[in-house]
Structures are given as C-alpha cells and as structure tokens.
Amino acid sequence: MSNILFNDVLNTILAGDLPLDELTLKLMLITDAYVPNADDDFTTISAEEVVEVNSPDNGYTAGGETVTVLSIVNGELLANHVSWADATFSCRYALLYDATTPASEIPIALFDLGGVRTVSANVFQILWGAAGGGSGVVLRLSQN
C-alpha cells in the first residue's frame, strides 16, 4: 500500500479552504488491523489507534503527538519530526489529521510505514523525508 491523501481533504485543499499552517495538526499511530480507504472518516480510522489496541501504559498518548509546522512553501509542508519516548507498541500506519476542533477531527493523510513496526521500551520516531536534522517535508502537492 502507498500513502494516501483522503478524498474529502484533497477537495478542501484544492478549493483553498484548508489553511494547513493555521491548524492544530497531530500524528496518530494506527495498527495493521486498519484497511486503508481514501474515503474513510476519522472515527473509522481512529478505531484502530495504537492506544485502543495496546495497554494504555505503553508510551503512547491517545490522539497522538502534535506536528509542529515550520513552513508551507511552493506546495511543501515542512514540519518537525515526531517521537514517542519509552514506547512499547506496534503500528503500521501514521495518520496526519486536523485536531483543531475536538470531535470534528479531519483525516488528512495516511503514511504507510512499509510493514508493522515494533518498538520495546525505546524511542519511536517518524522522520519526514531523509534522515538527519530535526525536520522534513511532510506533504508535497505538485503537478506531474
């Protein structure tokens, strides 16, 4: 499976109605029980969140971690890497979503981690783009 941009948010971005640099963006980890679908809503996806399946004392906070947007230039969203300390869990996907209005969360993109990733009492990180530095490109909207 490849990464997906959810259909509802794609239309909103193209219409210019989703100011990504003004939103509270979060990254939620999802288990391999989720079957990706570009038409899914937040409730469907979050039902397979890591915290829902594993022990609540696993180093993962319900709802995921905040993504700090550094800039949006030329169709690229640049943000800091995201990490969980003292983590013990398994996940397959990372969900980027708009958490600005609780109970009205909007899924933006789903990142396939290339298989189930397991961590045991260690740091788990999502590194955007090439390794190195503290940030990278999260989304790139471009024409082919």
Image: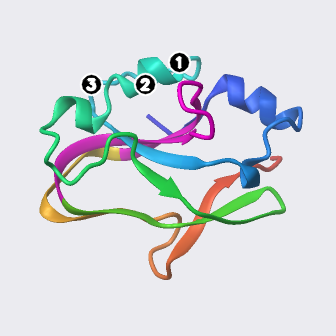
- Secondary-structure class at tag 2: helix
Q: Amino acid at mark 1?
A: Asp
Pointers 2 and 1 in contact (C-beta within 8 Å): yes
Residue at 89 percent across and 32 percent down: it is 15
Q: Which residue lies most toward the bottom here?
A: 133
Q: Is residue 15 above or below residue 27?
A: above
Instruction: Determine which residue is flagged by label 2.
Output: 45
Which of the numbered marks, if any, corresponds to residue 33? 3
* Residue type at the position of mark 3: Ala
Q: Determine whether, in the image, residue 23 is placed left or right of residue 40.
A: right
Which tag, 3 or 1, sits closer to the chain's start?
3
State the extent of the magenta-drawn residues as a range. 87-113
Q: Nearer the viewer, residue 111 or 20?
A: 20
Q: CA distance from mark 3 to mark 1?
A: 14 Å
Q: Position of residue 35 (x, y in %)?
A: 38, 21
Point out which mark residue 40 bears: 1
Graded by Cα atoms within 10 Å as few (under 14), some (14 to 19) or many (20 or more), the crowding at tag 1 reads some
Q: Quadrant of residue 119?
A: bottom left
Q: Mark 3 touching mark 2, by CB under 8 A?
A: no
Q: Residue at x 19, y 30 (%)?
A: 53
Q: In screen coordinates, is 11 left or right of 97?
A: right
Q: Earlier in the sequence, mark 2 or mark 1?
A: 1
Spatial CA distance of label 3 from label 2 is 10 Å
SS for dot 3: loop
Residue 48, position as x, y percentages in the image: 31, 26
Q: Residue drawn 49% across and 38% down?
A: 2
**What secondary structure characterizes most of the magenta part?**
strand
Q: Quadrant of the N terminus?
A: top left
| Residue 88 in magenta stretch | yes
